[in-house]
Amino acid sequence: MVPLIPATVKIGLIIGDVLIQPALSASVLALLSYGPADIVSRISELGFLQDSIGLGGLKVVLKVLLGLGLVRAASRLADGLALNNWRLPSKKEWDWNQEVAVITGGCGGIGKAIVVGLVEKGLKVAILDYADLPADLAEIDAVSYWKCDVTSESDIAEAADGIRETLGHPSILINNAGVAGPHSILETSQDDLKRIFGINVISHWSTTKQFLPAMISKNKGHVVTVSSLMSYVPLPKVVDYAATKSGIQAFHQGLGCELKFLYNAPAVMTTIVSPMWVETGMTKRQAAKSEATRKKMMQPDYVARKVLDQLFSCRSGQIFLPENATWLTAVGGFPNWLQESIKDMGGKMATQ
């Protein structure tokens, strides 16, 4: 019963998403209204229509679905405008061959895939990472590397000085570095807590304090925050990780608000990406549990492509991956019985 409830909700949302596609409802409605008489006649003679709402009723349903679809399309358009201070295309010119991007945790996983995509677009990329630079990235002239402990404000300050001296002021900052390790709340040591919050949360303050002032002075820039859908539905044994991702959700929202009202820099963009399971070094234990689990995980290249598309659109954004998992962001507003059912399902999956 418990797993059935959230699964039913998810299936219902997916079906509903298909039904309110304006192109679908408009096409069927046009067929019924203006299509060949023999085809319309055959449709009207279908048993389930004759026994229920009839052809006229079907047209009413399609009109309602079309209306809902158009409302949703208008809402999504308004979403994009609202996230960009009600602006259409960016007012600032972006010459990708002249832009500099900084990314934390760029030596592997999603970060490495983003680095490759940025270089292909012509950008110079500075990687801040404690891991060694992979040989394939070391061969790329447009890639610069600073071995950096992102939990250390002095390390980041030193790297930032080097980046400004050699590459210039970055216009893109991608806070991607993150760590996780499976352990319960009682098993989590203070050292573990300091490390995960230092890398996953506090480093965002350190990097932003270094690179945001130049963006504000030019009223041009883009700060990307790599979060997780787990910030909305924490799971057992990764509560510390989920807490850090909830923290940077607040950081992202507050940053956008400060850019508008404190710094008068509305053209400095902010984007947050919240993927579900991604097959990286952090999730290899989870993936190793079963082949079925591994197949459900997204690949880093897929997530990176979504981030890159958003960057190159010169627009702020919120990216949820997979896109049909956006319903998880509303779990906190569900009735308690449904919230607990969803949490129970996630908890059982995480502890099996």
Image: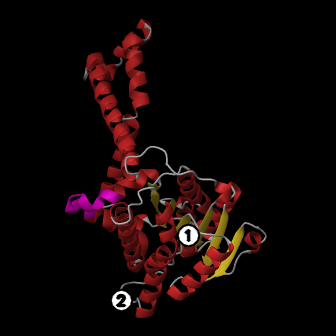
Give the mark nearest the N terminus, 2 or 1. 2
Residue 248: percent from left, percent from top = 40, 71
Q: What residue lies at 43% left-to-right and 29% top-to-bottom?
A: 23
Numbered range of the magenta stretch: 329-339
Kind of element beneath mark 1: helix
Q: CA distance from mark 2 to mark 1?
A: 24 Å
Mark number for residue 223?
Answer: none
Residue 331 belongs to the span the image colors magenta: yes
Compared with 351, 23 (above or below) is above
Residue 258: percent from left, percent from top = 35, 66
Find disc 1 in the rendering and name its residue.
287
In this orientation, which residue lies closer to the viewer: 311 or 344? 311
Q: Main secondary structure of the magenta part?
A: helix
Q: What residue lies at 59% left-to-right and 66% top-to-bottom?
A: 110
Find disc 2 in the rendering and name its residue.
186
Which kind of residue does numbered mark 1 sit on?
Answer: Ala
